[in-house]
Structures are given as structure tokens and as C-alpha cells.
Amino acid sequence: MADPGWTPFLAVVAVLTLAVLGLARQSQSLIREYGPDDEAGDASEADLSDGDEPDESGGPAELNDAVPETNEALDDRESNVTPSDPGERTPAETRPTGAEPDIELTTGMLLANVAVTQGVVAAIMLVAAWYFSIPADAFGVADTAASIGFPAVALGAAFGVALWLGNELATAIADAVGAAYDEAVRRMLAPDSAGGWAVLLGAVLPIIALSEELLFRAALIGVPAAGYGVSPWLLAVVASVAFALGHGAQGRVGVVVTGALGFVLAAGYIVSGSLVLVIVAHYVINALEFLVHEGLGIDDVSFGRRIPGV
């Protein structure tokens, strides 16, 4: 067997990490641009709840007292509008306030995008590991039951449940002190059919868990620690920061909580030496997030509150 190519493999990992963070930032901007605007909807409902009834044209009742424009005034205003080339404007410029977006991000589109992107990242890492002869044990995949057998799967499942409960507690504390945790991405990815749930739980979430653990735990912690003797705990800090930045769409609180969660996953990886354990834990966390909040409609686990309308 050829000597491992630690340096070229880590160069590939560095490029992949930057690409993943760049794609995450682009996705965050895209969701903000074309995703659902819950705040706008809430504001509209709040305005109407204050006692303002819409008139026949759909405007607030207080606008009924306004003096209507004459036909001549309307003609003058329309004649002053200078047409422009829609191709030179951005989506935000071509979409007036309250208008429908040019494109609609459907759940199927988002799930497909996540699955393909994460799948490509995982495939590149595996091919690079094979090409540069990186040993499996550097990733945390040893030929032992504790590493890849039932004990690793069982411990990973228990670890995932514990981390999910901790994540729920952290989110509840953040909500209690008025710090917003953006859940728009999770709600946009939540399916509305049995088939969609099967795809999410049976394909998309496993791909996410495999890809992110390969990158943020195995490749960024296990491989450099094995190849160069760098402290895995120091690498865990760096990897957890990168992991947090990759989840910027969840808002500032989400980034902090995700970073802390990533470090605990890294600690589990370092202590156990098992990549399978943290992949299973990662999957359990994500699956419980969707099943409890989106499937069962429970907003706050600690108090059992349900999401309105679910």
C-alpha cells in the first residue's frame, strides 16, 4: 500500500470546506430572497387585529377617507413612468413589496438540492481518501464492533437523543431571553406527504449526517490528528467553528447552538474513535427535530406547546 498523501488530501478538504461554507452563504441569501416572509405575514395580521377592517379594494378602513385621484392625475402619473429592461434588474428590484416572488422554493427543490450537494461533497472526500491512500482508521472506521458494529450504533442513538434534548433546552433558554432561533429552513424542508417524509428520513437526512460528519469530524479532526499528530481537541474547536458557520441560515442563535452541538459531537468522536457513532447521533438529532416539531407540531418540548395551525 502506498504511503498516505496527507497533505494533498487535506488540501482537497480545505477547498471542500470553503466551498461548503460559500454554498451555505448563498443558500442563506436565496432563502431570505425567495423564502416565506413570516414576519410580513405576522405584521399584516397584527395590523388587521387592531380593529382595521379592509375595504372593498383590500386596503385598511382608514384609507376610505383619502381623496381618490382623478382620471387625469392617474394618466399623468402613469405617463411619467419610464419603462426599463427587466433583464437588468435583480429579483428583489423586479418584485414589489407584497408581490409573489419570481420563483418559488418548494420542499422538493430544497430536499433535492441538499441531497445532491451533500452527496457530491461526501463522494469527493471518499474518492480523495482512496486516491491518496488515507487509512480508514484515520477517519474513525476501524474493523471492530465498538467502531462500526451494533455497540457503535446503539451508543450513537443514545448520544443523539441526549444531544437533541440538550439542543431543545438551549433553544428554550434562548427563546426565554428573547433571542430568536430561525426555524425557517426546517419548516421549508418539512414534507407534507408520506412519500416526502420517507425521502427525508430515508435518504436526505442520512446523506446529510454522513457528509457533515465525514467533513467536520473525520476529515477536519481525525485525518490531521493521525497524519501530523495535531491535538484533536484543538482541531475540534476549528472544525466546530466551521460547522457553525455552515448553518448561518438558522440565525445568530442557531449558529451559536450549532457550534456548541458540533463541539460535543467532536468530543464524542474523539473519545469513542468511531465515525459511525457520530453519524448515527447526527441523524437522530435531525430526525427528532423534524418528527417532533414538524411531524407532531410540538413547538416547545419542555411545555408541550403546539405550533399554531398544526
Image (spheres, rainbow, N blue to C red):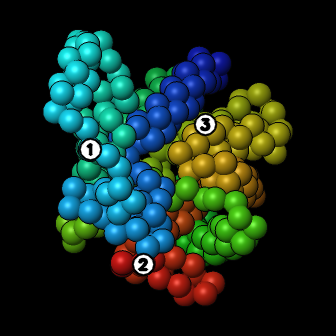
Mark 3: amino acid: Ala
- Residue 222 or residue 17, whichever sits in front: 17
Query: Is residue 14 rendered to the left or right of residue 74?
Result: right
Question: Residue reaching furthest bottom?
Answer: 304
- Residue 203 or residue 6, whichever sits in front: 203
Q: Are marks 3 and 2 in contact (CB under 8 Å)?
A: no
Label 2: which secondary element: loop
Mark 2 crowdedness (10 Å alpha carbons): few <14, some 14-19, many ≥20 = few
Residue 68: image location, x then y, percent: 26, 44
Which numbered disc, 1 or 2, marks the residue closer to the eye?
Answer: 1
Residue 200 seen in render: no
Label 3: which secondary element: helix
Q: Which residue is mark 3?
A: 219
What residue do we see at 60% from left, 36% from top?
A: 219
The disc, 3 or 2, on the residue closer to the chain's N-terminal end is 3
Relative vertical location of residue 267 with respect to residue 117 in this rendering, above or below: below
Relative vertical location of residue 251 with respect to residue 191 in this rendering, above or below: above
Residue 134: image location, x then y, percent: 57, 31
Q: Which residue is mark 1?
A: 68
Figure quadrant of residue 103: top left
Residue 28: image location, x then y, percent: 48, 39
Figure quadrant of residue 235: top right
Q: Quarter of the image containing the C terminus?
A: bottom left
